[in-house]
Image (cartoon, helix red, strand yellow):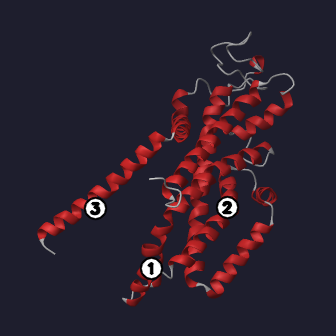
Amino acid sequence: MTEREDAQDSILHAIQPRRGRALLVRSLLKSKLALIGMVIIVLAAATALTAPLLAPADPSRVAVAERLRPPMWQEGGTSDNILGTDSLGRDILSRMMYGARVSLLVGCVSVFLAGLIGVSLGLVAGYLGGWPDTVLMRIADIQMAFPFILLAITLMAVLGSSLGNIIITLAITGWVSYARMVRGQVLSLREKEFVDAARCVGVPRLRIMWRHILPNTISPIIVLASFGVSAAIVAEAGLSFLGLGVPLSVPSWGAMLSQAREVQSKAWWPAVFPGLAITATVFGINVVGDWLRDVLDPHLRKD
């Protein structure tokens, strides 16, 4: 290969990622719903990152004399507590901002761990076949036979309530989806010509799996992970609502909903605002996940 051809090849490799990013941005701008979802995700992430700087009050500060103070636009409300206070006089806006950190941390880290476990096991099961495939898939079938919420409650009851334990629980209960999806992809890809060519030249199995097969499964993994984050956020809120999630001392949207049950007949705001935060965040992640599926799946692509 001449120096000119080398230069042309390097230029093409530099242009292709830029062209791909440009197409993604163009597709995002065309989809108003996906754009709204992306804005919601960015706002939630920015709120979580800047909570210590922007929160108007200490989220754990108890002021019984200020309990159940209404939002500032209602009679009796003040600008010191824009969204009001809860049953212990804690500022709801501050607790929601810190709660975003818990929800997004649990969602992203648990999905990463579940994906890491599931993708690795799915690659091994799909490529090797035989008894590794049989054993891993039977384990997956056994786990899927248990209802998710029952398995999660059991694990949290055994491990105890903490932020780390809820992440471990969601990772353990979530790996099966990735393993089954990747295994199905690998069963098809391992018969392709480029895999046969790699085998013929003596490429090791591990290198074939990670360098040749795995990159061709990235698109469905990304889509599944996007939906997994929203599912993990809802699961964390549900477990915290049941008192099995993060400790009550840690601000969490689910814990806020659980504590609001005691005063729901007297005040609507302690439950409504955390519920809206969960709904908006999950909505944003889901619509972005739908957009990613349409963009990355060639069968659904319109252009």
Q: Is residue 266 left or right of residue 73?
A: right
Q: Which comes before the other along the chain, label 1 or label 2?
A: 2
Q: Is residue 199 above or below residue 125?
A: below
Q: Which mark is residue 246?
A: none
Horizontal side of 142 relative to 113 (left or right) equals right
Circle on res. 13: 3
Is tag 3's residue or tag 2's residue first in the polypeptide sequence? 3
Residue 108 showing in the rendered view: yes
Residue type highlighted by circle 1 = Ile
Q: Are marks 3 and 2 in contact (CB under 8 Å)?
A: no
Give the x, y percent position of residue 289: 57, 50
Q: Residue at x 59, y 58 (%)?
A: 224
- Counting residues from the start of the chain, the first of labels 3 and 1 encountered is 3
- As helix, strand or loop, the secondary structure at mark 3 comes to helix
- Marking on residue 208: 1
Q: Please tell me how crowded label 2 is: few (under 14), some (14-19), or many (20+) other residues with Cα within 10 Å.
A: many
Label 2 sits on what residue type?
Answer: Gly
Distance from Cα at disc 1 to Cα at disc 2: 26 Å
- Does 57 appear above or below 194? above
Q: Residue 52 appears in which quarter of the rendering?
A: top right
Residue type of the residue flagged with mark 3:
His
Residue designated by label 2: 174
**C-alpha distance separating marks 3 and 2:** 36 Å
Q: Residues within 10 Å of mark 1 (few under 14, many from 20)?
A: some
As measured in the structure, the alpha-carbon distance from the residue carrying label 3 to the one carrying label 1 is: 22 Å
Which of the pair 107/287 is nearer the observer?
287
In x, y percent, where is residue 9?
22, 65
Badge 2 marks a residue whose secondary structure is: helix
The outermost residue toward the left is: 3
